[in-house]
Image (cartoon, grey):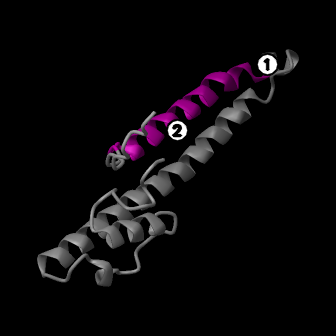
């Protein structure tokens, strides 16, 4: 049976991560506030940790909000640098790096710059 030809991976979907994480954080905090008056009853039935789990979820959500905002800003800076690099005829934008990468996406951006196409580099292709 012949193997189907490989096609490049589609570009990643853009979502409003800040709104999604922010909504989840608000829900965790609301759950904490709702469960807090029932702390005594919950403790009597062996579920005294539930409000604190909700508070921990809200706290982790705040960390997630910070991360998502930093990631969104780094992507915007990278896009602006790439557009400025291609607008001045500087090639693929590999030499216009401002050092604003936040760490986790550096390999993906490097692969995109090396391939010359968004999302078609070897790091983004699936088998």
Q: Earlier in the sequence, mark 2 or mark 1?
A: 2
Residue 94, picture quadrant: bottom left
Which one is nearer the viewer's eye here, 108 or 3?
3
Q: In this rendering, is residue 109 above or below 85?
A: above
Q: Which residue corresponds to mark 1? A: 42
Which one is nearer the viewer's eye here, 123 or 55?
123
Which one is nearer the viewer's eye here, 31 or 127?
127
Q: Decide whether residue 36 is among the magenta residues.
A: yes
Instruction: Answer with left or right where residue 83 lies relative to residue 44.
Output: left
Residue sitting at 29 percent across and 59 percent down?
A: 118
Q: How many marks?
A: 2
Report x, y in % for residue 13: 33, 43
Residue sitting at 29 percent across and 82 percent down?
A: 96
Q: Which residue corresponds to mark 2? A: 25
Residue sitting at 41 percent across and 45 percent down?
A: 17
Q: Decide whether residue 43 is among the magenta residues.
A: no
Residue 116, picture quadrant: bottom left
Q: Secondary structure at mark 1?
A: helix
Report x, y in % for residue 86: 17, 75
Residue sitting at 79 percent across and 19 percent down?
A: 42
- Does the magenta stretch mainly form a helix, a strand or a loop? helix
- Residue segment shown in magenta: 13-39
């Amino acid at each position: 049976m012949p193997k189907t030809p490989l096609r490049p991976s589609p570009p990643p979907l853009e979502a409003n991560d800040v709104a999604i994480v922010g909504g989840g954080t608000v829900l965790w905090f609301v759950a904490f506030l709702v469960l807090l008056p029932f702390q005594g009853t919950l403790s009597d039935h062996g579920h005294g940790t539930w409000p604190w789990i909700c508070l921990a979820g809200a706290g982790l959500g705040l960390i997630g909000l910070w991360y998502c905002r930093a990631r969104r800003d780094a992507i915007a800076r990278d896009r602006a640098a790439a557009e400025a690099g291609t607008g001045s005829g500087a090639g693929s934008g590999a030499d216009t790096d401002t050092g604003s990468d936040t760490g986790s996406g550096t390999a993906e951006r490097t692969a995109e710059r090396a391939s010359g196409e968004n999302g078609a580099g070897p790091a983004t292709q699936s088998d």
